[in-house]
Image (spheres, grey):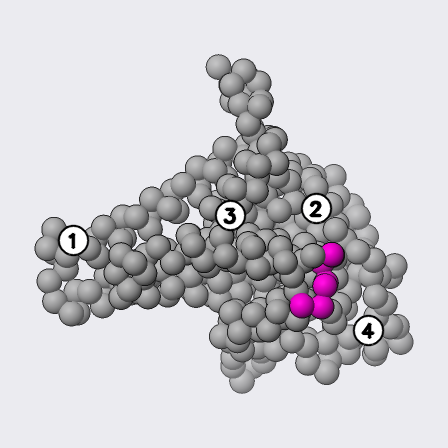
Amino acid sequence: MSQASTYKMGKKRLLAHPQDIHCIAYHIFCLIAYGCAFWLWLNPELAKIETVWDRVAFVGGAAYMLGWISGVDVGVNFHNHTHRRVFRSKNWNKWFGRIWTFSGGWPSFFWNHSHVVVHHANVMRDNDWTLPKKKADGSFESIYSYVFFHWPWRYAVHLYQDFTSGRGGRHVGRTALKEFAIFLAMWSVPFFIDWKMALCLWVLPQWIGNAVTMGSGMYVQHAGGMPKSKDRPMSHSTTYLSKFFNLTMFNIGYHIEHHDYPHVHWSELPAFHEKMKPKLIESGAHVVPYGYYKAAAIVAQISKQGSGYEKFVNDQAPGFAEEPVARTDERLAREGGSVEAGASLS
């Protein structure tokens, strides 16, 4: 029996799209991974973690892997849910969303606000505080500065300002307090079990997931971009064509397509990209043949031959324009043009 048939017979009342079972399975896998790490910490004799250095090695490996999968779980997996709800039931979406993000160090309401209200509606504009700070020429601050300073420090300040000023609608502050209380009740549980374990295998992985995994991804999604405008309709983001990367990352690499058409289901983005290809070429969109990991490695390079940032913004996938359209304020100024504020993309 096909997956679609199973969906029609048994899951129509629960899932909004049959492919979303992969999202649910991935999140459950992440929770199990945390549970396994906690069990190993609490049973060191069975895990053969006998010395201080054994524990240091265990924490180093486990925290990095947990952080990596947590960053993907929230920054990619839950991200898809914010645009296309996984369940047909409003209550299922609300509660599963809360359970979805607490293991990534986020109240779901806070992440939804940051991504949809702030980022998607204002991508590359000055009031999109989720992105790296810009230099005078329009290029981003270094990836190192962004990774170490954006989460949770900048996010905390901006979220407080947004919720106390009413950005996001009426009663946003009241809702934020309620959601934070629900989040805190779930998030604090590991501290009651073992506070040292919580710091090493809960807080540290969540920092890695948000600052390193999500932070570097967010950086390269928009490095070299500019606000959407009539003359530059698709220069706000970069699309990544690596098949392996997209296969393992819920097609998050098709980022221009996602920003312009956020309600296209993640599983349909490869086919949608093919339909958009002529427009991408015509507009001089920035499209590269690899994935986020290689892009992050490139922009992180510092050498006498020039910065990796410049190398990245000038890369282009075969089959597209030989050179990407100038994508920084400085280059646009040299052309005699201007950067116009784009319309909302959400």
**Cα gap from disc 1 to disc 3, whole angstroms:** 29 Å
Q: Amino acid at mark 4?
A: Leu
The foreground one among 166 and 12 is 166
Q: Can you identify the residue that label 3 sits on?
A: 98
Task: Give the residue number, with chain letter if any, for mark 1.
Answer: 43
Element marked by disc 1: loop
Q: Residue 79 in the image: x percent, y percent?
A: 58, 49
Query: In screen coordinates, is 328 left or right of 61?
Result: right
Between 11 and 275, the one nearer to me in the picture: 11
| Residue at 25%, 60% in the rendered image | 194
Give the vertical position of 170 relative to 306 (above or below): above
Q: Viewed as shown, does residue 307 lie left or right of 71?
A: right
Secondary element type, mark 2: loop
Using the image as rendered, state which of residue 214 and residue 311 is in the foreground: 214
Q: CA distance from mark 3 to mark 2?
A: 22 Å
The residue closer to the viewer here, 195 or 155, is 195
Q: Which one is earlier in the sequence, the residue at label 1 or at label 3?
A: 1
Along the polypeptide, which appears first: circle 2 or circle 1?
1
User: Where residue 313 sits in the image (x, y, percent)?
Assistant: 66, 67
Q: Compare marks 1 and 4 and give the one earlier in the sequence.
A: 1
Give the x, y percent position of residue 312.
61, 67
In this figure, which residue is indicated by the disc labeled 2? Answer: 262
Question: Is residue 73 shown above or below 333?
Answer: above
